[in-house]
Amino acid sequence: MDGIHDMGGMQGWGTVAIDPDEPVFRERWHGRAFAMGAMSMGLSGTNLDAFRHGLERLHPYDYLADGYYGRWLACAETLLVDSGVLAPGAVEARARNLSGESVDEPADVEENKPVYERGGAGSLREIDDEPAFSVGDEVRAKDIRTGGHTRMPGYIRGRTGTVQALRPAALLPDTNAHFAGENPQHVYTVEFDSTELWGPDAEAAKLRIDLFESYLEAI
Amino acid sequence: MADPTHIKDRPSPAVRAEALESLLTERGLVKSEVLDGFINRFVNDVGPMNGAKVVAKAWTDPDYREHLLADGTGAIKELGFAGPQGEHIVVVENSDDVHNVVVCTLCSCYPWPVLGLPPEWYKDPAYRSRMVREPRTLLSEMGLDLDDEVEVRVWDSSAENRYLVLPQRPDGTDDLSEEELAALVTRDAMVGVARVSAG
């Protein structure tokens, strides 16, 4: 989907500061949010791709307001509510009660975990299909536009690059995130010249990105 | 447009995290000690010190370096490092001619088994947006100036492959042991936003 998460090439974010003394978790809740975020996939019966899509589905304000672990926390809640493990509004009501308010907490709802087939642990899969592309091939990133999950960032749509490597085949996040099948595919590292992506005045650089076979077309 | 006050008026994330934990705990779905263990692992056991050992070994053992560049996942596992976000690790080597740097524009994918969890700057929208578009300018702002002749290779980790940069070994370190070398290797150098300095 075209969302706040697809940040490649956006402008206006300012500069980057490195804090050499940054702790792993700056605040206690960062660690709790991280751990519960990681566990929310199993608890909601979903998967890593659904989790990433959960992050993308957050309202842009929610995506940004509380930083990385704020999104993990909000996404954990999203997946758990989607799967009926928690009722909508349960977290907010409990939080208000923990803050000294006295509000009614919603009754539990019926569990509604997704039902789908899994091809094994992790994301890598063995497939028998011959790869459609070889190292050195020129390929074009398709003009994919979807309201769902995809791992093809907008900034490479329609751009031409060269296959640099064939990586292990992996399940397709675009369908797995929606519990619509793993559809494992070959994955290629494709190199794009910066001028192909950003115009003739771009800084000299090569961009290398991993793309699923169905994202690409031969030239 | 949604009303941004829904953010202003809601409980803080610290309280919402506590609320979520209490809801999950009372349903028997998580245990506080399990969360503690998970958190402690990433605070104490998984971090850039792991990647530093990989780099130092590659600098001192040519066979290991070759293995690492051909099969990052396998060579890294040999040193005992594996786990989530490390299903397939590719190691890319810096040289006088090529400088590699890693980003994840779509989220913040990062090779956890060798670097731990990503630092704030890696997750910053400024880093995610700019590294693919103006890497030289951004690297320079972050303290790394590269000659015009050096090819800058930016890796956007958009699938399940995770990238680790093998930095150049600094001059003047011939007498150092593998352990002493590992102490020089920084997280930032293994992402590609810094060089390793001899200290």
Image (spheres, rainbow, N blue to C red):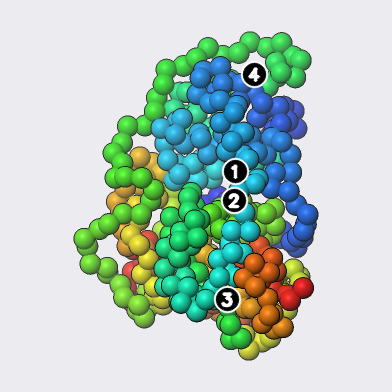
Nearer the N terminus, badge 3 or badge 1? 1
Crowd class of label 4 (few under 14; some 14 to 19; many from 20; radius 10 Å) = many
What is the spatial separation of the Cα atoms under label 3 and label 1, in whole angstroms? 27 Å
Chain on which label 3 sits: B
Name the residue rendered at 59%, 28% in the picture.
B33
Give the image location of residue A215, x and y in percent.
Answer: 37, 62
Crowd class of label 2 (few under 14; some 14 to 19; many from 20; radius 10 Å) = many
> Which residue is denoted by mark 4 in the rendering?
A93
Dots 4 and 1: beta carbons under 8 Å? no
Q: Which labelled disc corresponds to residue B59?
A: 3
What is the spatial separation of the Cα atoms under label 4 and label 1, in whole angstroms? 31 Å
Give the image location of residue B19, x and y in percent.
Answer: 64, 23
Above or below residue B109? Residue A132 is below
Which label sits in the foreground, 4 or 3? 3
Discs 2 and 3 carry the same chain letter? yes
Q: Secondary structure at mark 4?
A: helix
Dividing the picture into quadrants, the one containing residue A50 is top left
Q: Is A53 situated left or right of B150 in this image? A: left
Which label sits in the foreground, 4 or 1? 1
Q: Which labelled disc corresponds to residue B41?
A: 1
Nearer the N terminus, badge 2 or badge 3? 2
Dividing the picture into quadrants, the one containing residue A218 is bottom left
User: What's the residue type where badge 4 is placed?
Assistant: Ala
Give the image location of residue A69, x and y in percent.
Answer: 64, 42
Quadrant of the drawing holding the N terminus of chain B: top right
Q: Which labelled disc corresponds to residue B46?
A: 2
Residue B84 versus residue B50: which sits nearer the camera? Answer: B50
Dots 3 and 1: beta carbons under 8 Å? no
Crowd class of label 1 (few under 14; some 14 to 19; many from 20; radius 10 Å) = few
